[in-house]
Image (cartoon, rainbow, N blue to C red):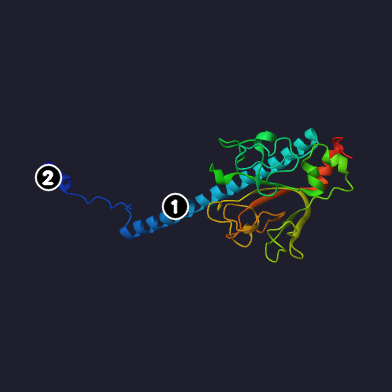
Amino acid sequence: MKLIHSQRAGSLHRGVVRPKPVSSQRGFTLIELAVVMFIVTLLLGGMLLPLSGQQDIRNHGDTQKTLAEARDALLGFAMANDRLPCPATAASNGVESPVGGGVCTNPYDGFFPAATVGLSPVDAQGYLLDGWGGETIRRVRYAISTANTSAFTTQNGMKTTGITVLAPDLKVCSTGVGMATPGTATAACAANTALSTDAVAVIYSIGKNAGTGGAGTEENHNPNPQSTLAADPAFVNAPQGTAFDDQMLWLSKSTLFNRMVAAGKLP
């Protein structure tokens, strides 16, 4: 009897369905999923928005590097040829005009003579490009002083004239506001706005807005397709912003003379 009872009890015990333990793990609720998606959207938005800004920074840096290389190339050319090159024209395929220097065809509104100087990268026509793209409007601009009867671009002109007499006359202003006689040979910076009054050469890019800008108060003074002023010896290098994005470097008289003297080309 005990054995039968024990077997029945065991059978009953085995037949009892025990509840499974409740897992402590659970899935995301709809609210939690919505919060996660919102956070992911914010993160992606924060990453995507600066991409254009990062590209702008890269292009700006590449342009600045190109301008610096162009200025160094001018110094090398001067030491090798006893003069600076004339600017290239829109039709000279990156070659200075006239070939061999002298009285330049476009002293204030020409292009950097990359083919003459031997600098790259250039476009299919031989013009030096800034960091903003491969369009023709992205070509690097270049201006040269015509002082002392074009001594700076004439073979042995600097040596013949002499350091004490040479007086380069390109001006670089921090603003175009108040500029005296703009568009004429006597154009000059307003009082207390001159960054340089005796630059030998100016090298610049008309920036990201090359195709649409250029007619504002500041950029209008730097020869460009939208400028309404005649080219003159005064240029503007204003703070960077929405109204001005030109990038500019210039070759100072002291830097040129120092290199020429060190190379034995002057006095």
**Residue 61, image x, y percentages:** 62, 46
Disc tally is: 2
* Image-based side of 203 in relation to 43, left or right: right
Q: Secondary structure at mark 1?
A: helix
| Quadrant of residue 134 within the rendered picture | top right
Q: Which residue is mark 2?
A: 8
The one of 167 and 60 positioned closer to us in this rendering:
167
* Image-based side of 130 in relation to 151, left or right: left
Q: Which circle, 2 or 1, is nearer the viewer?
A: 1
Q: Secondary structure at mark 2?
A: helix
- Visible in this render: residue 132? no
Q: Earlier in the sequence, mark 2 or mark 1?
A: 2
**Residue 6, image x, y percentages:** 15, 44
* Image-based side of 205 in relation to 135, left or right: right
**Residue 231, image x, y percentages:** 67, 54
Picture disc at residue 163: none
**Residue 1, image x, y percentages:** 9, 43
The one of 187 and 120 positioned closer to us in this rendering:
187
The amino acid type of the residue labelled 1 equals Leu
The one of 240 and 103 positioned closer to us in this rendering:
103
Q: Is residue 140 above or below residue 117?
A: below
Query: Callout 1: 10 Å neighbours few (<14), some, many (20+)?
Result: few
The amino acid type of the residue labelled 2 equals Arg
Q: Which residue is mark 1?
A: 44
| Quadrant of residue 241 within the rendered picture | bottom right
Residue at the (47%, 51%) spot, across then down: 48
* Image-based side of 192 in relation to 48, left or right: right
Query: Callout 2: 10 Å neighbours few (<14), some, many (20+)?
Result: few
How many angstroms separate mark 2 from mark 1 (CA)?
Answer: 67 Å
> Which corner quadrant holds the C terminus?
top right
Residue at the (78%, 45%) spot, across then down: 150
